[in-house]
Amino acid sequence: MAQGRRKVKPQEDEKSSSDPSSVDARDARDAVRSSQRIASQLHQLIAASITVAGLRSEHDILTSLAGSTRRVFDADVAVLTLESGPEAPLRGVAHRGQAVTCLGPDDFAAMEDVPAPRSTFVPWTDGGWLVAPVLEGRDQARGVLAVRRAEGEFLAEDREVLTLMAQMAATALGATELSREIETSETRLRILVDTAPAGIVEVDLKGRVQWWNRAAAKILAWPGYDGAAPTEPRFPAGASEELAALWSEVLDGAVAGGRDLIDVEIKGRRRYLTTSAALLPSPEGQATSILMLVDDVTDHRELKAEVHHAQQMEIRGRVASSVAHDFNNLLTLISGYAEILSKDLRDDDRSLEMVKDIQATASRASMLTAQLQSIGRTQSLEPVVLDPVTALQSNAEVFDRIVGADIVSRWSLNANAGAIRVDAGQFEQMMLNLAINARDAMPMGGELHVSVDAVSVDAERASELNLKPGNFVAIVVADSGVGMDEETRQHCFDTFFTTKGPFKGTGLGLAAARRLVEGSGGAITCESALGVGTTFKILFPSSDESIVEEPAAPRNERPRGSATVLVADDDEDLRRLMAQVLGRNGYEVLVAESGEQALDVARDFDGAIDLLVSDVEMSELTGPELAATLQRVNPSLRVLLTSGTAEATVVRDLLPGTSAFLPKPFRPSALIDQVHDLLSRR
């Protein structure tokens, strides 16, 4: 400021004075006025800097500094422009005697003579304007600060003051953008942390909880963090020792540590948590707290266990299916020859009674193979609308024979309970299995109670059972047997789980019952206590559909056949049985032990083959493949496929209306009925 008293423009020559004292006095007065003016400007600069330091928007900064600049220079007008940045372009304009305004692009036409930025970093004059650049960094101007007045020229020190004002504007605008970026980053980080799927918890060096995010509140059943929690949330009691060890490990210098928290009780449920922790240093580098990640991996572990269980069940299912296939062939032989014997022993009541026992045993064994086939795969259901009371009444005699004379059966059946939609065959199997289980639980005799009634399930109970609220039919099977302890009860529906000991139970019945009930939209529960007995409660959704009664099969004898039947099966005994049954009913029978041999037999036979009876699973050429090959040559060929493992959909690729499916084990009468039905379609 040493030369600040010189004017920007050359001053006119003043009249010389011959009095040296007069010159000194005038210079002194000028110096005083200049000092006062500079002091006033500095005072206003300080006030402006204090004011602008608290501003956080470009609009406010431009308005404040434009007004301050006009006052500092006692100018007619001051303009602060912003040409770059997120809020640009803007202009803060201060006119003498008017309110300071901030103009947007639409209002720039009102002041067209405002100087534009130049590629210079020092103040300059432009017409009547004194202009200083507002710099962004060191090499780019983001706007200008300009002042203009009609009277009084700008002095050299005015350039320096305007430069200071421009630097103040650049600093304030930069700080505002930086503050906005920091706020944006903080908001982004806050949202990221608060919406993170893993729980984040900050504790002090003594383990006291300081802060936590939304996921942590959900995992640990804490209230949401609002900075003013009435009580300090605490970790579950079962995790305190593991967490103390984790914090000690981190405080001892470990970069990060982790712990698995097993069987932690949270709101009455056992959960599996995984945690990790690291020191959180202060800006000075001192450890002030510990940051923890907490995740609930209970569902993941359960899913992993379910996948492992499913893989095991798939392997078991393949083995069981293979066993069931061979077992069904044997049962077909047993029930087949038993039926033939029953017709030959009509006059021998004693022998006929034993044959009926053989048939009943074979029927129970077929139930076991059906359960074996359900292992490791989803068994397709064929639901029909039925009356459970009628179904149970029709099997009451079978129930009594199963439970024996030492057990008293008590029935409470509400005829108006309603209809249900369920697979009829599997429903019958389920009820017989429950009766067998009850019998085995009462070796010294007891009581078996079976009831059917209509019930209504409210929303709370439905949520517990994973059902939809509404009307249900409740079937209850209760015994007064030995009962089960709690651990046994929790596993009673697991596949292969049994309490009957080796060679007595399969562990399949209750697992099959649960699959059937849940597959039909219902729920099954078990209540039991040692020495008290066991109660199974089954809920099926009520059905408003009409019950379709199947027409009774005619008792008339089927007419003797006269067609030619080709039998293909790789089981020699079963092949011989089917040939014998068909031959006894008048059919001409051709036999083959494989699909390939069946093709040779059909090719070498002079006459027409009317019907193919084939097993589905054979060595190389399967039954469906054999049937499709023969139908290409003879489209009128009828096909009956049999299997102990396949399903009825196996015939869907054959010619429409020409085929049928007969599941194993089957009775000879069922075979003849199917053969007659197929041939009658020609």
Image (cartoon, rainbow, N blue to C red):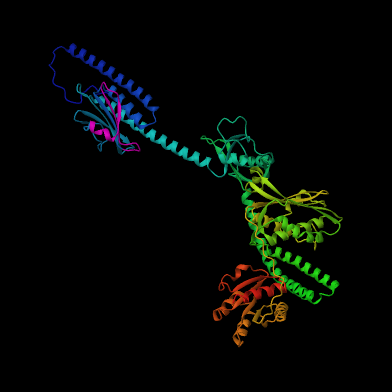
- Is residue 351 visible in the rendered structure shown here? yes
Location of the C terminus (image quadrant) = bottom right
> Total marks drawn?
0
Residue at the spot x=41%, y=35% of the render?
180
Q: Specify the segment rendered in magenta.
A: 84-110
Relative placement, left or right, of 29 versus 277 is left
Residue 570 coordinates in the image, percent (x, y):
68, 78
Q: Quadrant of residue 431?
A: bottom right
- Is residue 114 visible in the rendered structure shown here? no
Relative placement, left or right, of 511 versus 200 is right
Q: Quadrant of residue 256?
A: top right
From this view, report whether residue 126 is shown above or below residue 518: above
From this view, report whether residue 171 is shown above or below residue 498: above
Between 144 and 218, the one nearer to me in the picture: 218
Residue at the spot x=81%, y=68% of the render?
357
Residue at the spot x=26%, y=18% of the render?
34
Q: Quadrant of residue 631?
A: bottom right
Residue 346 coordinates in the image, percent (x, y):
81, 74
Residue 184 coordinates in the image, percent (x, y):
44, 38
